[in-house]
Image (cartoon, helix red, strand yellow):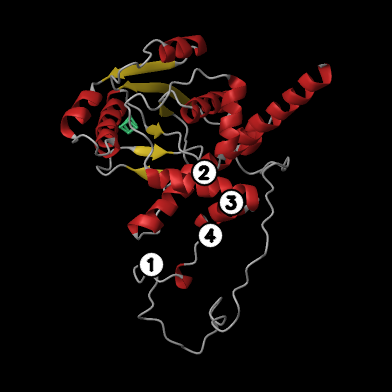
Amino acid sequence: MQSQIKSEKSHFNKLQKRLRREVGRAISEYNMIKDGDRIMVCLSGGKDSYTLLDILLNLKTYAPVNFDVIAVNLDQKQPGFPEHVLPDYLESLGVEYRIVEEDTYSIVKDKVPEGKTTCALCSRLRRGILYRTATELKATKIALGHHRDDILETLFLNMFYGGKMKAMPPKLVSDDGQHTVIRPLAFCREKDIVRFSESKAFPIIPCNLCGSQDNLQRQAIKAMFTEWDKRFPGRMESMFRALRNVAPSHLADTSLFDFKGLTANGQPVEDGDTAFDPVDVPLSFKDDNDKDEKPDQASIVNIVNL
Ligand code: SF4
């Protein structure tokens, strides 16, 4: 029994360390947080946003930069929303927070015809309210809990149904140029977040209170990923690395690469003489995520590894 408890604790510590390290890496790589930032963490009551808040609060203790965290939940007035859960949790942490009450549920039910998907309008309304709240709270950054698998799902949704090679960026500026949005969990695997969230016993609020379900296309892509992850370990990691390692000259977008102006000028071109070679694709990809990697000495990562 003792040894089982010890082993569970050691697994949890490794998991927590890995998540913290990945968040540190993303923050450092995309320059997400700087000294004096006031980060508004959007808390939905799901596993992802609880994990994000937990890790940012921990990071705040060790990071070499000073930043503040304020948790914000939007109570959209869905029937059955347990209003006390988030305030109770946030009080217990002693973190600054704001609950914003806006009945977007009624607006969405009123405007969207029965049987049509409600998520697009709901998300638009939510985004507007959260941007307004960030301004009121003088937040310099808005942090969202999307993770690596969300980013890959979005990429595939856009490729399969939108004819675009477009995912979800780790950092972006809002349409009106007023807000910087960051996704510090961008490098974190969903399965790690699930395990972390279970171990921490976060008081999860179900996400289907509005009666809407994840759209079928997204569900199909999730199922495809689950299957791939079982059959081809490392494929998800490889796909995500691909997103960070793009070769515009080997795609077909004329706005990213000047194909029209491309002519042989007698000078050697890096990567330019492989047109007749077979594509060099490794047969397997090593998933080194479960190993205890050495921290990146040059980044904030070594702080969270302490
Ligand atoms: S699932 Fe419900 S709450 Fe979530 S975005 Fe869709 S309509 Fe809004």
Q: Earlier in the sequence, mark 1 or mark 4?
A: 4
Label 4 is placed on what type of residue? Answer: Asn
Mark pair 4, 2: CA separation: 15 Å
Residue 81 point in image, percent of width and height: 35, 17
First along the sequence among labels 2 and 3? 2
Q: Is residue 98 left or right of residue 109?
A: right
User: Element under label 3?
Assistant: helix
Name the residue beneath numbered marker 3: 228
Q: Mark 2: few, some, or many residues within 10 Å (few <14, many ≥20)?
A: many
Point out which mark residue 126 bears: none
Specify whether tag 2 is near ligand 1 (CB below 8 Å).
no
- The crowding category of the residue bearing disc 4, from other C-alpha atoms within 10 Å (few below 14, some 14 to 19, many at least 20), is few
Q: Is residue 70 above or below residue 82?
A: below
Tag 2 residue: 148
Q: Against 115, is 38 above or below? A: above
> Whole-percent x and y of residue 211?
33, 28
Residue 256 - label: 1
Whether residue 52 is visible to the viewer of this picture, yes or no, is yes
Residue at far left of view: 111
